[in-house]
Image (cartoon, rainbow, N blue to C red):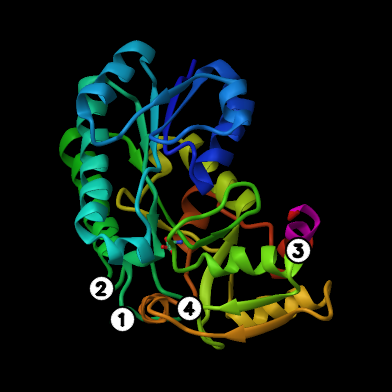
């Protein structure tokens, strides 16, 4: 029987992944953990532990008490906030991962999941259909921490036998839990403002295409990767993962098909430079070949679903 510890359970991805894992593995078998207070859905449906992933003693104590077979560590500081607090971002993103990997060995955890990001790529990376293996010179602290983290994952797999698995998430769009501090967050906010105000001021310029994915696809990708037999996993750094790619005016046009009066203006800030350093589209053929990845949602299907659910 699998028992899972998910750290970062109050975040944009963690909150939804916790509930999906509970549905799949049983509510009592998925321990949610975070530094923050959980929402009522997470608190009432299964076990919750307060945990700062940097506190190795408390982390070890939780592993001792729950004996999970799998750890998902989703605690991280994202790209835009990371540029404001670089040392904190580095500490959380790197030492949180190191604690996870080291403690997974001590406590004989069978599988580890850790998310990477399109932020591992940089301005010298080929921008269109960025391949799995390519030039990687990230220039944000977040991207540097994810790139170093990928090297750690591969090292712990090769040298210590840790069954660690990872995905390079594109921008993730969802309506349940807000994202925080990311460069791709505009693509979430634009739906909320379309419903609430009928207009949106975008912090990226027209023409800034970025790889994106709807949350149900991101959750399914994560669970499919973790359920795949170990011998099908050829990438132990992190897999490229793709679903769609769009620029702000394209998501605006998709929303206008449902809300014709929706208006967008553009006021780019420091996040424009971050976006311009990242790929416009991603080649995820290795994930498709190794464990059968295939996205379901395109832009218009996502827009319809988002606008139905956003309050
Ligand atoms: N969504 C993240 C960010 O914008 C990228 O991984 O920081």
Query: Which numbered disc flags the more N-terminal residue, 1 or 4?
Result: 1
For the residues marked 1 and 3, what is the alpha-carbon distance in whole angstroms?
31 Å
Whether disc 4's CB lies below 8 Å from ligand 1 is answered: no
Q: Is residue 147 visible?
A: yes
Query: Which numbered disc flags the more N-terminal residue, 4 or 2?
Result: 2
- Disc 3 packing (10 Å; few <14; some 14–19; many ≥20): few
For the residues marked 4 and 3, what is the alpha-carbon distance in whole angstroms?
20 Å
Q: Which residue is farthest left?
A: 159
Answer with the quarter of the image where residue 100 lies.
top left
Indicate which disc residue 139 carries.
2
Indicate which disc residue 301 carries.
3
Magenta segment includes 307: yes
Residue 175 appears at what percent x and percent y? 65, 53
- Disc 1 packing (10 Å; few <14; some 14–19; many ≥20): some
For the residues marked 1 and 2, what is the alpha-carbon distance in whole angstroms?
8 Å
Q: Residue at x 67, y 75 (%)?
A: 251
Answer with the quarter of the image where residue 71 lies.
top left
Which span of residues is magenta-colored?
305-309
Instruction: For the residues labelled 1 and 2, say whether their Cβ atoms are less than 8 Å apart.
Output: yes
Query: Which numbered disc flags the more N-terminal residue, 3 or 2?
Result: 2
For the residues marked 1 and 4, what is the alpha-carbon distance in whole angstroms?
11 Å
- Under circle 2, the secondary element is loop
Query: Which numbered disc flags the more N-terminal residue, 4 or 3?
Result: 4
Magenta segment includes 231: no
Answer with the quarter of the image where residue 6 lies.
top left
Indicate which disc residue 123 carries.
1
Whether disc 1's CB lies below 8 Å from ligand 1 is answered: no
Ligand 1 picture quarter: bottom left
Instruction: For the residues labelled 4 and 2, say whether their Cβ atoms are less than 8 Å apart.
Output: no
For the residue pair 286 and 245, the one nearer the viewer reads as 245
Q: Give the labeled residue for mark 4.
A: 280
For the residues marked 4 and 2, what is the alpha-carbon distance in whole angstroms?
16 Å
């Amino acid at each position: 029987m699998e028992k899972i510890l998910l750290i970062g359970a109050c975040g944009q991805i963690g909150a939804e992944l916790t509930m999906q894992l509970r549905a799949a593995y049983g509510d009592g078998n998925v321990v949610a953990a975070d530094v923050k207070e959980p929402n009522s859905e997470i608190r009432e449906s299964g076990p919750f532990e307060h945990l700062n992933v940097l506190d190795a003693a408390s982390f070890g104590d939780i592993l001792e008490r729950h004996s999970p077979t799998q750890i998902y560590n989703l605690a991280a500081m994202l790209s835009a906030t990371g540029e404001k607090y670089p040392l904190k971002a580095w500490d959380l993103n790197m030492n949180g991962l190191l604690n996870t990997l080291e403690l997974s060995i001590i406590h004989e955890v069978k599988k580890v999941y850790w998310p990477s990001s399109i932020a591992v790529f940089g301005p010298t990376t080929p921008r269109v259909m960025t391949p799995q293996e390519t030039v990687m010179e990230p220039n944000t602290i977040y991207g540097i921490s994810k790139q170093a983290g990928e090297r750690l994952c591969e090292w712990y797999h090769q040298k210590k036998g840790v069954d660690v698995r990872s995905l390079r998430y594109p921008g993730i769009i969802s309506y349940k839990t807000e994202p925080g501090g990311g460069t791709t967050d505009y693509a979430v906010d634009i739906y909320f403002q379309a419903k609430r105000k009928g207009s949106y001021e975008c912090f990226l310029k027209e023409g800034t295409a970025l790889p994106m994915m709807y949350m149900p696809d991101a959750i399914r990708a994560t669970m499919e990767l973790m359920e795949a037999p170990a011998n099908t996993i050829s990438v132990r750094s992190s897999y490229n993962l793709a679903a769609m790619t769009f620029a702000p005016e394209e998501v605006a046009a998709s929303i206008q098909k449902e809300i014709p009066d929706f208006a967008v203006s553009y006021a780019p800030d420091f996040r424009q430079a971050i976006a311009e350093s990242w790929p416009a589209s991603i080649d995820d053929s290795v994930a498709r070949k190794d464990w059968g990845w295939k996205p379901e949602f395109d832009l218009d299907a996502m827009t319809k679903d988002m606008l139905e659910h956003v309050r």
